[in-house]
Amino acid sequence: MKNLISVTTIGALLFSIAAFAEEGAGQAKELSGNMVANGDFELTDEASKKPADWNPGNNAAVKSVLEVVKDSTGAHSGTSYLKIQVPAGENAALIFPKEHMILEPGKEYELVVWVRGTGTFRLLVSQYAKSAFVSSVGAASLSEATPQWERYSLSYQLPEEIEDVCVALQSTGEIEYDSLCFGPKK
Ligand SMILES: [Ca+2]
């Protein structure tokens, strides 16, 4: 079954965006079209202590540590961000949201996320058809992060044969993510 982002989720998202209004109009505007639930990593699943609405992907297979860090001065948005640590020599960690998105063919979309750390990372859009993984779209290789928050983006257009997609974050070393947004390109 395909998962469309529900009206309730969008309502909750808009409500949480209002709370960030004091952080600057530019950022609030960027988050307003967000199709990814908990892209700002402000919600934590109480049982697992992992970010709510996200799957840890292959983190069980690699010896990586995934956590939501509560740090109001260090966070790029709100009071928390996602931290992923992968020991040297291990495979890159992959994390993606639980809900897939249905997109309009031909329309241009953009994934934006703020990243910092000591390691490498890559933004991806994973493509599915007939409930099966088809391929991932993104940079050819992982890039080095910087110690300060930097904005990275990936443009995406839905190919005809693809039915639904999800964003994915791949990383090695110690990488922190915040303020992730995916939506129609402005
Ligand atoms: Ca945040």
Image (cartoon, grey):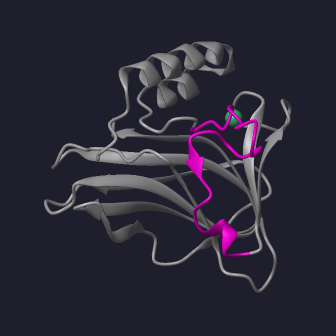
Q: In the picture shown, does residue 64 fall above or below 101?
A: below
Point out the image quarter for the C terminus.
top left
The x and y percentages for residue 175 are: 74, 60
Residue stretch in magenta: 39-62
> Which residue lies at the image location 69% right of the left edge and 32% below the top edge?
42
Residue drawn at point x = 34 percent, y = 54 percent: 165
Judging depth in this view, the residue of 104 and 148 nearest the camera is: 104
* Residue 25 falls left or right of residue 148: left
Q: Is residue 57 magenta?
A: yes
Task: Identify the residue at horizontal 43%, vertical 23% (top origin).
Answer: 10
Left or right position of 49 against 134: right
* Direction bottom: furthest residue: 89
Query: Quarter of the image holding residue 43?
Result: top right
Q: Nearer the viewer, residue 157 or 94?
A: 94
Task: Please give the count of numbered marks on the rendered protein.
Answer: 0
Q: Looking at the image, is 170 positioned above or below residue 35?
A: below
Say if 81 sits above or below 26 in the image. Answer: below
Report ligand 1 position as a quadrant.
Answer: top right
Q: Is residue 25 above or below residue 97?
A: above
Residue 117 in view, yes or no: no
Q: Evaluate whether residue 65 shows in this view.
A: yes
The percent coordinates of residue 17 (x first, y second) are 56, 19
| Occupied quadrant, residue 173 | bottom right
Place of residue 158 in the rendered image (x, y in percent of width and height, measured from the top left): 23, 55
Say whether residue 155 is magenta. no
In terms of secondary structure, what is the magenta stretch mainly?
Answer: loop
Residue at image position (22%, 54%) is 163
Classify residue 33 as left or right of residue 87: left
- Frontmost residue, 94 versus 158: 94
